[in-house]
Image: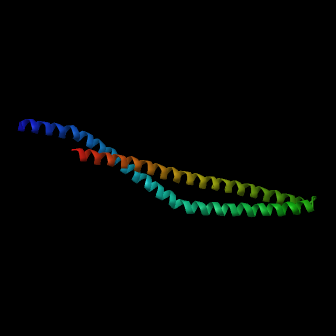
Amino acid sequence: MQKLVLLISCTWLLFCMPISGQVNKDSISLVSEIYRNQLRLGKLLGHLEQQYNKKQNTSEKAQNSANKDSIAADKSSDNPGSRKLARKAKNIANDARKDSRSARIESENLDKLHSDIQYLKNKIENNQAKLNKINDGNANNHSYR
């Protein structure tokens, strides 16, 4: 009888060991992925203020260039025969166009950064939920043993 109990307990132990080992591998991989994503998130959050400042600066520069372009266009229209004023207005208009393009690009970069941050936050939350499920499953498995 003792041999039978010993054999059953050893079989039960051998049967349960690979299952718990797999769960541990899954939980370890999830923990490492959560950690990597949190590091990436920290880096992105560190770049957020810098990117916001870049966007603000380029937007202000674009607005100033647009104002200068408007003034130069008014001066050129006041004196339509002046080639010098026309050339100056054309150069200022080109600068305003470049500055507005830069402002749009910086705005797009900031939007992309926000979406990347949100994606990583969602991914971390999903992995955390998976890890909690695994841990809850382990707690339930251990309570039945």
Q: How was the colour assigned to the protein in this rendering?
A: rainbow
Q: Position of residue 25 (x, y in %)?
A: 31, 44
Relative height, residue 69 to residue 17 (above, below):
below
Q: Position of residue 35 (x, y in %)?
A: 40, 53
Is residue 24 something one can see in this rendering? no
Q: Is residue 34 left or right of residue 49?
A: left
Q: Position of residue 99 (x, y in %)?
A: 71, 58
Is residue 86 something one can see in this rendering? yes
Q: Is residue 30 left or right of residue 16?
A: right
Quick one: quadrant of the C terminus?
top left
Q: Quadrant of residue 80?
A: bottom right
Q: In this view of the protein, which residue sits in the foreground, 25 or 40?
A: 25
Q: Is residue 112 left or right of residue 134?
A: right
Count up the numbered dots.
0
Q: Residue at x 51, y 59 (%)?
A: 45
Relative height, residue 39 to residue 5 (above, below):
below
Q: Position of residue 82 (x, y in %)?
A: 91, 60
Q: Residue at x 33, y 48 (%)?
A: 136
Quick one: quadrant of the N terminus?
top left
Q: Residue at x 63, y 52 (%)?
A: 108
Q: In this view of the protein, which residue sits in the foreground, 37 or 82?
A: 37
Q: In this view of the protein, which residue sits in the foreground, 123 or 66?
A: 123
Q: Is residue 45 left or right of residue 86?
A: left
